[in-house]
Amino acid sequence: MLRIRLHRFDQGTHFPHSHRWPFHTRILKGRYVHRLYGPETYVRAQLESEHRKPLVPSTIRTEDEGSSYAIDQHMVHSVTSATDTFSLVIQGPRLKDQSLRTAQDGSIIWKGGRATEGKAAVEQVEMSRDRLLQVRELALRSGLIDR
């Protein structure tokens, strides 16, 4: 199963993480700095080492409007986005039960999706109807959608 998503980023940095699926992204508006850290096994070994140091990306790219990339479900990455950056994401099938997330303190959190999350965690990431209408209006004004 494939999913196609319009993804809107607020300004900010997302901690290093992987996904449960491979995906392809095309930047439609805005830009972000994309950091690639390596496969989960490599990142996990670094973070669980007794001589743990902060993660250092192996690659840093600026993803500008019109650029695209694809990564698999094992790659750990992070982004620092400009305000109101939009991307189109083609999400492949879920190939893993959990994805790796790093916490602010550098510890590992394994995420399993909505089916494994409590009600409070799901509500924290759900978009309200009012917020959806605001993002829709921004996408209309930006020319990304026409209705």
Image: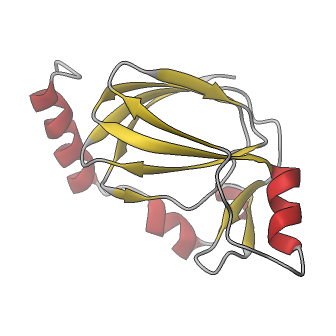
101 to the left or right of 32: right
Give the residue drawn at x 63%, y 81%.
105
Quarter holding the N terminus? top right
Give the residue drawn at x 15%, y 22%.
143
Quarter holding the C terminus? top left
Point out residue 61 in the picture as x, y percentages from the top left corner. 50, 36
10 to the left or right of 104: left
Q: Nearer the viewer, residue 89 or 26?
A: 26
109 to the left or right of 62: right
Q: Nearer the viewer, residue 107 or 93?
A: 107
Residue 17 appears in which quarter of the rendering? bottom right
Q: How is the image coloured?
A: secondary structure
122 to the left or right of 108: left
Point out residue 22 in the picture as x, y percentages from the top left corner. 70, 31
Point out residue 98 in the picture as x, y percentages from the top left corner. 79, 54
30 shown above or below 116 = above
Residue 39 appears in which quarter of the rendering? top right
Residue 32 appears in which quarter of the rendering? top left
> Residue furthest toward the left?
141
How many numbered callouts? 0
Point out residue 109 in the picture as x, y percentages from the top left corner. 73, 69
Give the residue drawn at x 42%, y 52%.
80
Give the residue drawn at x 75%, y 38%.
73
Q: Nearer the viewer, residue 129 or 84?
A: 84
